[in-house]
Amino acid sequence: MRRQLSTTGYAVLGLLALRPLTPYEITQQMQRSLDYCWPTSERSLYDQPERLVAAGYAMRQEPDGDRAARYEITAAGRDALRAWLATDSAMPRFQNEPMLRALFADQGTVADLHRTIDDLRAHVAQRRRLGVAQMEPYLTGDGLFQERSHIVTLTADLVARVLDAIEDWADEVAQVTAGWTTTEGLGLTDEIRPILERIVTEGNERVRRAAEAADATSDND
Amino acid sequence: MRRQLSTTGYAVLGLLALRPLTPYEITQQMQRSLDYCWPTSERSLYDQPERLVAAGYAMRQEPDGDRAARYEITAAGRDALRAWLATDSAMPRFQNEPMLRALFADQGTVADLHRTIDDLRAHVAQRRRLGVAQMEPYLTGDGLFQERSHIVTLTADLVARVLDAIEDWADEVAQVTAGWTTTEGLGLTDEIRPILERIVTEGNERVRRAAEAADATSDND
DNA sequence: ATGCACTACTGCAAAGTGCAGTAAGCGGCG
DNA sequence: CGCCGCTTACTGCACTTTGCAGTAGTGCAT
């Protein structure tokens, strides 16, 4: 009954809050809908249902014939989920290996960098295709859990914005590095300097705006 | 000599390629510069130097007095780093707990959602302040490893674009949900529907453009 | 002289990951 | 008809990572 759930545990609990699922169905739902914000290995998901049962947050339904048993959220589980939503969130944690490789690009070849960027572009394109296909049904009222479309739309919007950001960046890097013959020691070329200037000026601009917005908020309190 | 390094191992190796570091310095550099793309626990970093030595990719320098020993990359280490850069990259893996909580917002209160979004905005603002402060010196030629400023600028640009995307999203969510009195069952309201339409139309537009670009590339091969 | 924060780690239990392996069902094919 | 390969639905295991508690030294204020 006692141990504290991990974020992955609450993610699974959130899925069970919508409907009872078998362990395999949990892996599929997780892949389909939560992978955008909470990627996990399939392996770890198979252990979650029994942990939820041990915590009193889920119960195993009697299996129907020789099919796998579904797990169902309990009242205590709903309470725990509600309580978790009222706690402070961990902030985003973005593992971005293509960017890591870009940071070490001067240890490798121009071709290495181009290949990594191309792979990233292909990956983003693929993700977007899947995402759009999942969202289209909601427009005609045929989405999964259509009554949740307000929430699904808002979160999909974040995914779309981040994918756009990555794609635009990849396009820019591909363009800027197209003429490179070395990865080392280039420094602030005519193409790089304006990018740095934009980052710093627009960054400062946004920092200023955020500070003003924060001031306004604290005035209203 | 044998075991295969993790991505974290290569990240540390990449740092050592710039200059020899003590374990503590590795944690500080990792925090300062690679946390944007490769967040890790401090704890795991303390084990990396000895693993690199075991693999033959680094050597422990003789410590100077009672100070901690620095670890230095070996020729085999540089080869391994180069070889790694030539392999396929893993694709980004974004853990985004605020978004996960937004997806389950209908299990909690409007206040929970607003608080999570506010925390996210504050976090993004903080990250941006740090990032801009790190980039400004490069404009005047005073950045760390200024000769790497072309690479540092390009990767900082990705960070800036992603932070902008998240901030704009947070602003939008704050605005759209400001008038909500419930988190449940709202569906496609007058404010939500246009967002969904934008996601789908602009998403399809980008999918189309990416497909054209991919065609053009394969024509050129 | 004592307290206290900060630096620089180490140990340990629990959680997560990658990958190999397994077993059941099922459609095709000679 | 039996076997082949494929997909579905998992389990076991070795290894890595994480979070957190603990510790030892150092500077510096009270």
Image (tube, coloured by chain):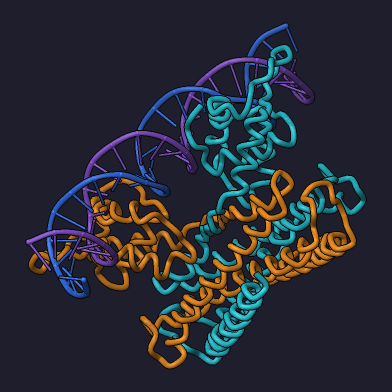
Chain colours: A cyan, B orange, C purple, D blue
Compare residues D12 and A182 and report the one nearer the observer. Answer: D12
Q: Residue at left 52%, top 57%?
A: A93
User: Residue B184 location in percent, x, y?
Assistant: 79, 47
Compared with residue A185, is residue B80 higher up or lower down, i.e. above or below? above
Number of numbered discs on residues: 0
User: Residue B128 location in percent, x, y?
Assistant: 53, 75
Compared with residue A147, is residue B10 higher up or lower down, i.e. above or below? below
Quick check: A206 left or right of D22? Answer: right
Q: Residue at left 73%, top 63%?
A: B173
Q: Residue at left 78%, top 64%?
A: B176
Which quarter of the figure is the C terminus of chain B placed in? bottom right
Compared with residue B42, is residue A177 higher up or lower down, i.e. above or below? below
Q: Residue at left 83%, top 46%?
A: B185
Query: Is residue B63 visible from the viewing direction of this image?
Result: yes
Quick check: A71 left or right of D28? Answer: right
**Residue most toward the right?**
A140
Compare residues B195 and C22 and report the one nearer the observer. Answer: B195
Compare residues A215 and B140 and report the one nearer the observer. Answer: A215
